[in-house]
Amino acid sequence: MKKLIPVFYLIMALAIISCGSNPYAKTNRLHKKQAKAYGKQLQQFPTPENQKESALNYGDYWVGTTNFNLRKPNYVVIHHTAQDSLGQTLTTFTLPRTQVSSHYVIAKNGEIFHMLNDYYRAWHGGIGKWGNNTDLNSSSLGIEIDNNGKEEFTDLQINSLIELLKEIKEKYSIPDENFIGHSDIAPSRKVDPNANFPWKRLAEEGFGLWYDEAEVENLKLEAEFFKPNPLAINLNSRLNTRIPFIDKLVFPEVIPADFNVENALKIIGFNTSDLEAAKSAFKLHFIQEDLNQPFGKHDLKVLYQLHKKYL
Ligand SMILES: [Zn+2]
């Protein structure tokens, strides 16, 4: 009998370990229950019986088409979690009272937690707008990257993210320019992902757009282009001859004096109802430095070059 006692404990321990191997078993049951309820909703047919309450002039009988499938996501919105640990984020997304979630969470070691079927609507975007789209949650996948909001993203995270994006992009045919950040769609509320996020590298892989650096170098503001020639001023200050500013063999492209920053931001997709917030969001995504400085010449040139890619 004495020999049996350790065996009994061993069996008990194994049972506890196997039952407890997924610490989210309880909330997973809640998830499945909700998914089942939404499944039922999808199976409701628009029959005349169901339409009795409506004042609309429906036909006498129901004709269900045989040709359909599920709606697909067409945007990807990237976030940083702004939390201190992966565990904290997973807990936040499994507590009903928080009312926030995302489809994917990427851990610092590159592990991906796929928390919600892509065809469901996660609650990651909140109030936001991109172009004329005012319900990004309905048309996007949300990807949260474990990051406290200030730190660098790990290489493992970015590599995993890129692999995930490749899969998503191909599966749902998402256009390059529809890979955006939370701050892009909610400029006055959000600053994620932070300025360490490698948007340029992502754009090189086909996720999001980036400006052409050589073309930006070659841009001149109209005021710069027609600046007075110092030699001419010295020789004949009264005439103050104005000649074109030429310092390269390549003729510079001139940004017209009436170039409209607000319209260019709108063309890219930003909501400009708070113009200063939209400018800051643009800088966070495409400039990523001197974020506290006012919108300067370089920012203007990048905006000018970039907005043409969205025309
Ligand atoms: Zn976010």
Image (cartoon, helix red, strand yellow):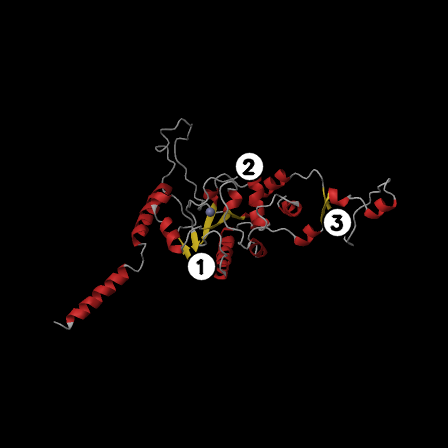
Numbered label attached to residue 274: 2
Residue named by callout 1: 108
Question: What is the C-alpha distance between the residues marked 3 and 1?
Answer: 44 Å
* Labelled pair 3, 2 in contact (Cβ < 8 Å): no
Check disc 3 and report its element: helix, strand or loop.
loop
User: Residue 202 appears at what percent x and percent y?
Assistant: 55, 55
Decide: is 3 above or below 244.
below
Decide: is 252 above or below 56.
below
Q: Is residue 26 visible?
A: yes
Question: Which amino acid type corresponds to the residue marked 3 in the rendered image?
Answer: Pro
Comparing 276 with 132, the one in front is 276
* Labelled pair 2, 1 in contact (Cβ < 8 Å): no
Which quadrant is home to the C terminus?
top right
Which is nearer the N-term, disc 3 or disc 2?
3
Which quadrant is home to the N terminus?
bottom left
* Labelled pair 3, 1 in contact (Cβ < 8 Å): no
